Image: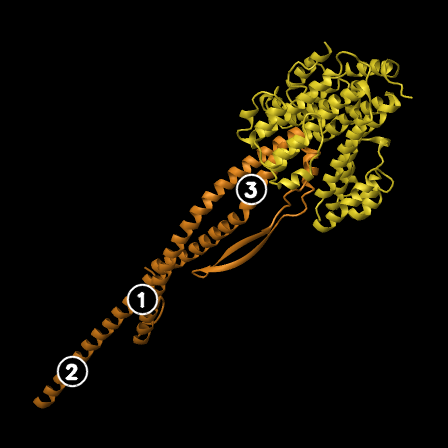
Amino acid sequence: MFRSGVAGYAAVHARVRAMYSTMLTPEMWARLREAEDFPILITMLKETVYGPYLSQVEDKDLSPRRAVYQIKGRLTDACMAAISMVPEHARPLLSQLYRRFEVDNLKAILRGIVTGSSWDQVRYVLFPLGSSTVLPAQAMVEAGNVEAAVEQLQGTPYYATLSHAMRRYTAEQSLFPLEVALDLDYWRTLWSRVGRLQGQDHQQAVRIVGSLIDTNNLMWAIRYRVYHHLSEEEIINYTLPFGHRVRDADIRAIAAGADIAQVVTGLYPELTGVDELLQEPRRGLSQLELQLRRYVAEQCRAAFLGYPFHVGIPLAYIVLSEMEIDDLTVLIEAKSLQRLPEEFVPYLVLGGGMPERQATD
Amino acid sequence: MARINVPPTRSNLLRMKQELQFAREGYDILDRKREVLTTELMRVARDAEALQRKVWDLLAAAYQALEKAQMTMGRERVEWAALAVNKTIEVEVTYHGVMGVPIPTIQAHGGPPEMPYSLGDTTTTLDEASAAFREVLNRVPELAELMVSVWRLAGELRKTQRRVNALQYIFIPEYEETVSFIESSLDEREREETFRLKWLKNKLEKQGQSAEGR
């Protein structure tokens, strides 16, 4: 019997709200954006919830690369905390959401093997998942070849997917078939976990996970067509046939060469200036991607409004935490490259100065 | 003006004249080679300059795109996505000659895979950078071919110019000077010989007259 509704989520709601309140405020973002350089940015970040993670490394060793690695530790903690506190029936969904970092790690390991990298070279590019990962990362890297590394994954959720895709890898000697198989399997599994939920949980998960899938799927189809010039059939094969707003027909339309601006405007009438953005698709796509991510952020913030006892709250918190870390990555890189605010602010999703907390007001 | 240190003899005069003729012919040939090389160099250099400017522009755009990708994804994720590209273009170099200068023809085969990385952990900014660098990569063999041609033609032109200058300003004037010196020396010797013979003839005539008088 599920413990959902008020009984299941009262404590979760209170604790996630408390964690949500530790996210960076608009005032803090404004200060961080104005930081003169990278060391000052790090000093400021040490005064926030990211302080303990950054303080684990001595200042002299805190390069931009290392700083990004360290702050990701907070996302791990946020995910683990959220997963541990949700009711049993919602846990598989959050665990699968968190698994995306493991999928990215798996791809990094495979790339490391192909390029003959050592374990020491690979370990610091992996997302710090701690003991929660099922990947025998070091053993895989030390296996020395992709086939042997995949064999090490027996008993994990990735083995069946990868061993199925190995035939194409062997024929093409390209990691792309393996990577795309992992991505598609990840999102299919996540969507199936959403499908198992009921009531408010299902509605909220569909809205948040659905908007994430929509954003990815739509951008994949567009990127495959505009940048990688894949055929209609390939685009359909490498995208997902489901979503919340974005349906299979929309993806097929893009794959078949339909006007991208028209498809996007039809799907997201609330997005402004799409026609102008996509007049020169290669210039406007990164801005469209950001607009879609901001839309996902709005969906997450909306979860904190109204009836609060559902999986949407921890789910939204994890997604927003990841976006916050992505924005901090932009800030860290921009400050280390000595970029002016007008050069990096357009790439911020949460920290760009827009009213990010309006959903909780 | 310097001249070659040879005895002023008729045989040396003949040899010097032959060598002067040879130097003048060499000069004509090298001068024509210089003209051909200059024309070819100007043509190739113009093409190379135009292509180099284009490649610099493409590279600037590519690095700008890469910086944007690094900024939005983090340098680590960009580097690791780039590691998925384990193939690049292969080049085949053949040579053809222009006035004896081996000029390369570079033919590129293959290239990075169309889909080097999956899109799951990357953003559009990386696609932009990847596309920009692919465009640069496609132009690099042609630029390399033109740049090597320019360097080789310029090197050969410099050598030819040095030889032409050496012939024009050193060897030919030296031979001319030497020929002129030998000719004037031989003329002088001839005049001396004529004078000596006349003097001898006069002396013999005078001796003959005094013998008759006795």
**Residue at the outermost left position:** B213
Q: Nearer the viewer, mark 2 or mark 1?
A: 1
Q: Could you say which disc has been placed on residue B201 in the image?
A: 2
Q: Which residue is mark 3?
A: B135
Report, in whole angstroms, how far the alpha carbon at label 2 lies from the one at label 1. 34 Å
Badge 3 marks a residue whose secondary structure is helix
Using residue B82 as the reference point, say whether residue A151 is left or right of it. right
Image vertical order of residue A41 relative to residue A285, above or below:
above
Q: Could you say which disc has been placed on residue A357 in the image?
A: none
Report, in whole angstroms, how far the alpha carbon at label 1 lies from the one at label 3. 62 Å
Disc 1 marks a residue whose amino acid type is: Thr
Q: Could you say which disc has been placed on residue B178 in the image?
A: 1
Image vertical order of residue B14 relative to residue A205, above or below:
below
Chain drawn in yellow: A
Q: Nearer the viewer, mark 1 or mark 3?
A: 3
Are discs 2 and 1 located on one and the same chain?
yes
Could you tell me residue B63's position as x and y percent?
Answer: 58, 35
- Which image quarter is the C terminus of chain B in? bottom left
Instruction: Determine if residue B214 is in view.
Output: no
Pointer 1: residues within 10 angstroms few (<14), some, or many (20+)? Answer: many
Pointers 2 and 3 in contact (C-beta within 8 Å) = no
Question: Which callout, 1 or 3, points at the residue further toward the start of the chain?
Answer: 3
Report, in whole angstroms, how far the alpha carbon at label 2 lies from the one at label 3. 96 Å
- Which image quarter is the N terminus of chain B in? bottom left
- Residue B190 sits in quarter: bottom left
Pointers 2 and 1 in contact (C-beta within 8 Å) = no
- Chain B shade in the render: orange
Q: Nearer the viewer, residue A302 or B26?
A: A302
Q: Nearer the viewer, mark 2 or mark 3?
A: 3
Using residue A253 as the reference point, say whether residue B21 is left or right of it. left
